[in-house]
Image (cartoon, coloured by chain):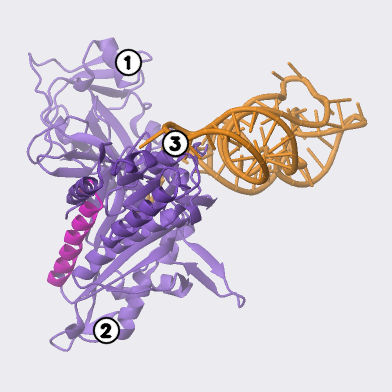
Amino acid sequence: MRLSKAFLPTLKEVPADAVVTSHKLMLRTGMVRPLMAGVYSYLPFGQRAARKAMDLIREEMDSFGAQEFSLPTMTPIELWDETGRNKDFGNEMFRLQDRKDRTMALAPTHEEVFCAIARNELRSYKELPQIWYQIQIKFRDEPRPRSGELRTRHFIMKDAYSFDVSEDGLDKSYQLHRDAYQRIFKRAGLKFFIVGASSGVMGGSGSEEFMVESDAGEDTCAINEESGYAANVEVATSKLQDEPDTGDTVPFEKVHTPGYKTVEEVAAFLKLDPSRFIKSLVYVGDDGPVMLLVRGDDELNEEKVLPILGASMRPAHPDEVKELFGAEVGYLGPVGMEGKLPIYADLRLRDGRNRATGANENEYHVVGVQVGDTFSPDDYRDLRVIQEGEPDPVGGRPLKVVRAIELGHIFKLGTKYSKPMGATVLDENGKDVPIIMGSYGIGVGRLIAAALESHSDENGCVWPMTLAPYHVAVILLKAKDETVAAESEKLYQQLQDKGLDVALDDRDVRPGFKFKDADLLGYPFQVVVSERNLAEGKLEIKRRRTGDKDVLPMADALARLDEWIAAEWDLVKA
RNA sequence: CGGGGCGUGGCGCAGUCCGGUAGCGCACCUGCUUUGGGAGCAGGGGGUCGCUGGUUCGAAUCCAGUCGCCCCGACCA
């Protein structure tokens, strides 16, 4: 590309609305422009990056026999009623009417549409397995689009679906995707990790998320790179034990604690460590109120409670608490509540000695509580939020708590869609069986954004070779000089002949402008052709990632460039 | 859905408290000079101040409503 003819609206100033790095860079480099909240136009430079990402994904999908489709995004609403997801998606799904007042949905994902094809076309187990995918725009009316390309209402996603006759087959299809995803993210130069996840509105028997560590991320994960443990904090566990109580057994006793309600206040008043307290929380679930106990210095993890209480769970209202316990929040405790409501205690409270907790009487607490003796919970469960530095559950190494971006999600769906939709095949015995499905997604815009979150510096983008819109920029200083122009033209051709994507900066602007632009745009390499160096038969080359610069005789410069290019490709090997 | 912030030439902002008919930097156009890290000088074009209504002799500025955008939380393949 000759930049003198290119549409490349780079910005010197940072747009006011951008907060996260990738958003700033994508606006400044002229990759994207906002059209409305959570909806972006891709401009040529951005589209080139997106295409690189899509080509990479396509290559890896095709490599294991996945077949590319292109399905409509406009879909009949009845399709979504078949699986109940018209209701499940609720306001998150865009709907529209045609002139006959027929309702349609803009697809937020494509399980139903692909499954409809499978239902109409697949008849026999002999036709399976099938793996189908597309790279297509999805629509989701997010409650809060944010962070530029990281959460949008209109985005490109690679979505794949597998169709098998057996659970074994599904496991194989799932593993093929899992392996391909690892190659894709590795080749995109991303340091990712895989976490087990809850399947949410997609349903199914299991799923895993591919995460990239980034402060701009919306998820929080606990990881240890050595042991390989990684989990969303929602489900993360640790090996942390309760510190055993030392000293003599303290007698059970009610103490007056006027006005002291929080663990910190009461602990300070009683001169006890907060860890020696039992924090009592009351929630209401599908089957009524439940008491949940954690150590005074721990925090309840609502996600871990969800399976116990059911989807309708909520904290109890103050009046409900008053009625059940005869005391207000702040003075609640498990002693004497056995049998009145289910009591679940965190694992760390097992065999706790000499603990303090609420007395179920306003302004009073009790001390000398022996867990399992003074009271016994109905069960012990892991209920707490883990903290940075705790020993991981596999190897006991310290956990790091990090923010992360979810780039991909793979699901074992089972028959969640095929059953209600009647997508069946005949098995070896001539019996109709529902097709067993999996689904597998990668957010293309997120992949680009995550790459920039991980690879940039104060001067701009630092693209990996795989995603770089252009690999090299040939920068002419003194574009009007004929010798410089001729030499640049030759290099432009020569580099392209090596299979590189080359930008020729032949614009009639000052050198400083070109250098700044080149650094901002993040070409992995810059080749500078100047009158000055040319007179000595020399060429200047720069490697963006390292900032290395060399001025060498033409042939040596090109040889050095080849070395650098090889080294850059090495960084993104699968 | 709750909380906060912001809408003034293409971009970044000042002016709003205290009403008097819109300004700065960048970008853009013309000319001259300049050419190794987002040039200098001179001249020039471009904004019914998000929108609607109200108060007033007079509204970017005050009042009411409305729309849009950003951020935090809730929610979320």
Question: Which quadrant: the C terminus of chain A?
Answer: bottom left
Q: Which disc number belongs to residue A151?
A: none
Residue A44 in sight:
yes
Rendered position, A423 above or below B39: below
Q: Which residue is mark 2?
A: A122
Q: CA distance from mark 2 to mark 3?
A: 61 Å
Who comes first in sequence, dot 2 or dot 3? 2
Q: Position of residue A34 (x, y in %)?
A: 52, 50
Q: Which residue is mark 3?
A: A512
Q: Are marks 1 and 2 in contact (CB under 8 Å)?
A: no
Shown colour of chain B: orange
Q: Is residue A566 left or right of residue A478?
A: left
Shown colour of chain A: purple
Who comes first in sequence, dot 1 or dot 3? 1
Rendered position, A468 above or below A383: below
Q: Position of residue A37 (x, y in %)?
A: 52, 49
Local secondary structure at mark 1 = helix
The span picked out in magenta is: A168-194
Local crowd at mark 2 within 10 Å, few (<14), some, or many (≥20)? some
What amino acid is labelled 1 in the image? Glu
Q: CA distance from mark 1 to mark 2?
A: 66 Å
Who comes first in sequence, dot 1 or dot 2? 2
What amino acid is labelled 3 in the image? Gly
Quadrant of the rendered image containing residue B7 = top right
Residue drawn at 34 percent across, 80 percent down = A117
